[in-house]
Image (cartoon, helix red, strand yellow):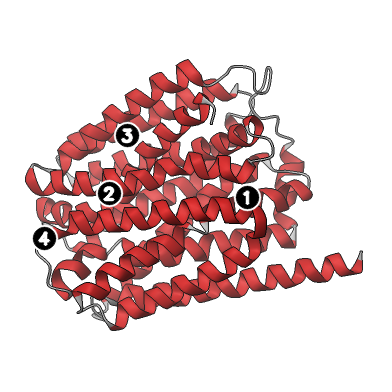
């Protein structure tokens, strides 16, 4: 892969730690600010909603900014936001920091996806998957490490470390990302044409899959720490290595998803979604078993992340067919995080209503089935349309 893709992967590594580490840090944040677990979950919800709501605005406002310069600006948000989060003496300041950081996520990965596709013609899905490997490595290495740091030192130190990763990514992007991918303009947006794509049925269905599929995933993983400690009976220190198992599942799912999707995208997506639902239901009913928890965490991660690059490629393909892929590339990352916010909210809601710490997994299973139904409808619709041509 070109060094530019490696630079993008470093930044997605930082983004991944910022997004996923909150799952392991929630108990420490809740304890530090004397709030409940579901209350601390707003640190995940605010981040996800920031990505969803402000990604299209940032992409539109930055439409005439060269791609490389835009990436540098976005990394600046990332560094400042994590620095504020690290320093925060009050929970509301933590939420402000999380919001500032969220301004980076969707636009960076969306623009990065376009760069990856441009630099790796013929291997587009693999290039996107390689860039997303930063997210999977974040969960394999970064999230367990920061959870351990949160347990041994403090959760504040975690965000100082993430700030440093952002600075390293900034230097890599400055050095390796070329200036002339799209001369003069990073993204030439015809706003009317770009917005018109939201009326396209196939695009809307694909975006619905983006919300519901990852939503199922995040409903479970946001509250995995209390499942591990309060239901399965693990010691608090075990959360870190179980998150390593989670990260291992993400890595394997991402690699297989990126490779297999090049050959059979929709069959892979359909099978991954239904298997994700199956793993979530098993975890709900058998969360008291330590072995089942470990296995289900792995498979939920593997099946869940096997869908990410295929879904991103599916949405970009449908949008390109409709004549507008630029805004959608970034907006779909926002939708992914709408799924994150939806999952975190639903998970907190069922816990708050005393359905138990394992209940988010049942809710996540239902969301995964809904995503499967949409994907199946999209698949059958495309077959029907092809047969009429």
Asked whether 35 or 158 is in front, the reply is: 158
Asked whether 257 or 240 is in front, the reply is: 257
Residue at the bottom extreme, as displayed: 285
Residue 198 in view (yes/no): yes
User: Could you tell me which residue is drawn at 42 percent across and 38 percent down?
Assistant: 12
Q: From the image, tell me which residue sits under label 4.
A: 236
Looking at the image, tell me whether mark 1 or mark 2 is earlier in sequence order: 2
Looking at the image, tell me whether mark 3 or mark 4 is earlier in sequence order: 3
Q: Compared to 219, does 287 lie above or below?
A: below
Q: From the image, tell me which residue sits under label 2.
A: 21
Measured Cα–Cα span from mark 2 to mark 4? 15 Å
Where is residue 166 shown, x and y percent of the image? 34, 29
Where is residue 26 shown, x and y percent of the image? 21, 55
Measured Cα–Cα span from mark 3 to mark 4? 28 Å
Where is residue 295 shown, x and y percent of the image? 30, 69
Q: From the image, tell me which residue sits under label 1.
A: 313
Q: Secondary structure at mark 4?
A: loop
User: Could you tell me which residue is drawn at 35 percent across and 62 percent down?
Assistant: 344
Q: How many marks?
A: 4
Looking at the image, tell me whether mark 1 or mark 3 is earlier in sequence order: 3
Q: Secondary structure at mark 1?
A: helix
Measured Cα–Cα span from mark 4 to mark 1? 38 Å
Looking at the image, tell me whether mark 3 or mark 2 is earlier in sequence order: 2
Of badges 3 and 4, nearer the viewer stands 4
Measured Cα–Cα span from mark 3 to mark 2? 15 Å
Looking at the image, tell me whether mark 2 or mark 4 is earlier in sequence order: 2
Q: From the image, tell me which residue sits under label 3.
A: 81
The 10 Å Cα crowd at callout 1, few under 14, some 14 to 19, many 20 or more, is many
User: Could you tell me which residue is drawn at 63 percent across and 34 percent down?
Assistant: 120
């Amino acid at each position: 892969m070109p060094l530019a893709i490696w630079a993008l992967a470093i930044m997605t590594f930082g983004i991944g730690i910022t997004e996923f580490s909150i799952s392991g840090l929630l108990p420490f944040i809740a304890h530090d600010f004397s709030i409940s677990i579901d209350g601390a979950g707003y640190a995940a919800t605010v981040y996800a909603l920031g990505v969803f709501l402000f990604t299209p605005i940032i992409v539109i406002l930055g439409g005439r900014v060269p791609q490389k310069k835009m990436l540098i600006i976005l990394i600046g948000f990332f560094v400042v936001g994590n620095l504020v989060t690290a320093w925060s003496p009050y929970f509301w300041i933590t939420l402000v920091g999380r919001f500032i950081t969220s301004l980076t996520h969707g636009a960076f990965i969306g623009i990065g996806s376009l760069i990856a596709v441009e630099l790796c013609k013929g291997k587009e899905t693999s290039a996107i998957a390689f860039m997303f490997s930063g997210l999977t490595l974040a969960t394999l290495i970064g999230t367990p490490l920061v959870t351990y740091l949160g347990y041994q030192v403090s959760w504040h130190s975690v965000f100082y470390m993430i700030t440093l990763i952002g600075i390293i990514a900034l230097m890599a992007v400055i050095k390796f990302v070329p200036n002339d991918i799209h001369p003069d303009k990073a993204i030439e947006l015809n706003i009317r044409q770009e917005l018109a794509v939201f009326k396209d049925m196939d695009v809307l269905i694909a975006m619905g899959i983006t919300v519901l599929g990852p939503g199922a995933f995040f409903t479970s993983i946001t509250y995995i720490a209390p499942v591990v400690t309060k239901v399965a009976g693990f010691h608090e220190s075990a959360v870190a290595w179980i998150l390593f198992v989670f990260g291992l599942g993400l890595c394997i799912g991402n690699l297989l998803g990126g490779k297999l999707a090049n050959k059979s995208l929709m069959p892979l997506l359909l099978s991954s979604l239904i298997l994700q639902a199956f793993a979530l239901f098993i975890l709900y009913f058998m969360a008291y078993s330590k072995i089942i928890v470990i296995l289900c965490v792995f498979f939920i991660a593997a099946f869940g992340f096997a869908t990410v690059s295929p879904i991103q490629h599916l949405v970009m393909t449908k949008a390109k067919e409709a004549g507008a892929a630029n805004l959608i590339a970034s907006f779909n990352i926002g939708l992914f995080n709408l799924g994150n916010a939806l999952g975190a909210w639903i998970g907190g809601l069922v816990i708050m209503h005393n359905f138990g710490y394992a209940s988010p997994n049942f809710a996540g299973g239902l969301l995964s089935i809904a995503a499967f139904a949409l994907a199946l409808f999209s698949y059958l619709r495309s077959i029907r349309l092809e047969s009429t041509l």
